[in-house]
């Protein structure tokens, strides 16, 4: 059964800093790797995804995936207070998606 | 216009009572899911469905039933609510576009069992 773990559990960074969030998974047959963002009191919303090894950049956000290491990460450049949220990584191998327990990010002005 | 809606948005139930949470989607997606989220934590899959009139057990199905009467509607039923079922419940829909199964979430239902 897929096991998805996130680190750190929480993180406080100053505005403008580079932030790195980590996710490990256990099933090497996993196909899609996601980051979702959930602002307080709101529903999770997909931020970005990747399916092949390497990196993908969208604006200030970059995903790195290393399937051999069973690891992927999210990097936020020039962190903003509006980035403060719960970040959930997710792994899918078909229609079933398994979520990590989340990293709570606080960006201080 | 929201594509996934949930009702009610919040509910207080008594221990041992029956609770029904409803979800409606206009995404024309085949797949629908029920998750629970405990305060500040990730999402755990309760039940899911990939076609009307059929449901599948997720990772934590005990104490929950699901019903998918149509492609658009998916309900979660707690026959005998317990204190441990206090949580926020999210419904989601997805399709197989590109194989990614991106989850589109509803706004959530906050359930408190007393």
Image (cartoon, helix red, strand yellow):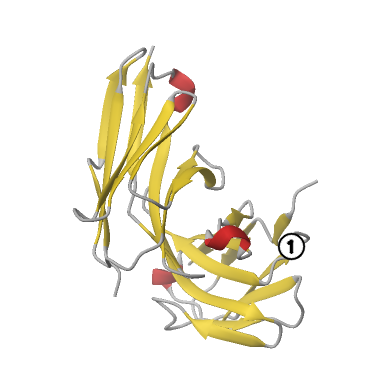
Res A82 visible:
yes
Residue closest to the eye, B8 or A29: A29
The residue singled out by tag 1 in the image is B25
- Image quarter of residue B91: bottom right
Instruction: Determine crowd level at label 1: few under 14, some 14-19, many 20+ residues with C-alpha closer than 10 A.
Output: many
The residue that appears at 54% across and 63% down in the rendered structure is B99
Frontmost residue, A33 versus B87: A33
Q: Where is residue A46 in the image (x, y as percent from the top left)?
A: 53, 45
The x and y percentages for residue A39 are: 50, 37
Coordinates of residue A71 in the picture (x, y in percent): 24, 50
Residue lying at the far left of the rendered structure = A69
Residue at x-position 26% and y-position 31%? A11
Q: Position of residue A88 (x, y in %)?
A: 39, 47
Residue A108 picture quarter: top left
Q: Report the residue that reaches farthest toward the bottom.
A: B53
Q: In this view, does B114 lie to the left or right of A27?
A: right
B5 in relation to B16, above or below: above
Q: Is residue A29 above or below residue B100?
A: below
Answer whether residue B38 is visible to the viewer in this image.
Answer: no
Q: Seen from this angle, which residue lies furthest front? A: A53
Where B43 sits versus A78, above or below?
below
Q: Which chain is disc 1 placed on?
A: B
Picture mark count: 1
Q: Is mark 1 on a helix, strand or loop?
A: strand
């Amino acid at each position: 059964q897929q096991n998805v773990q996130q680190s750190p559990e929480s993180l406080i960074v100053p505005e403008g800093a580079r932030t790195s969030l980590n996710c490990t998974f256990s099933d090497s047959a996993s196909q899609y790797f996601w980051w979702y963002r959930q602002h307080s009191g709101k529903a999770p919303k997909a931020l970005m995804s990747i399916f092949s090894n390497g990196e993908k950049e969208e604006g200030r956000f970059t995903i790195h995936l290393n399937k051999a290491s069973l690891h992927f990460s999210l990097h936020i450049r020039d962190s903003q207070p509006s980035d403060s949220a719960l970040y959930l990584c997710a792994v899918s191998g078909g229609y079933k998606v398994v979520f990590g327990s989340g990293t709570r990010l606080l960006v201080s002005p | 216009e929201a594509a996934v809606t949930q009702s009610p948005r919040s509910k207080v139930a008594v221990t041992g009572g029956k609770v029904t949470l409803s979800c409606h989607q206009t995404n024309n997606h085949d797949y629908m899911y029920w998750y629970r989220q405990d305060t500040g934590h990730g999402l755990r899959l309760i039940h899911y469905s990939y076609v009307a009139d059929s449901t599948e057990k997720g990772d934590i199905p005990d104490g929950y039933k699901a019903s998918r009467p149509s492609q658009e509607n998916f309900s979660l039923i707690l026959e005998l609510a317990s204190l441990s079922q206090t949580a926020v419940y999210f419904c989601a829909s997805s399709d197989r576009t590109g194989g990614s199964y991106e989850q589109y979430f509803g706004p959530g239902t906050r359930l408190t069992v007393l």
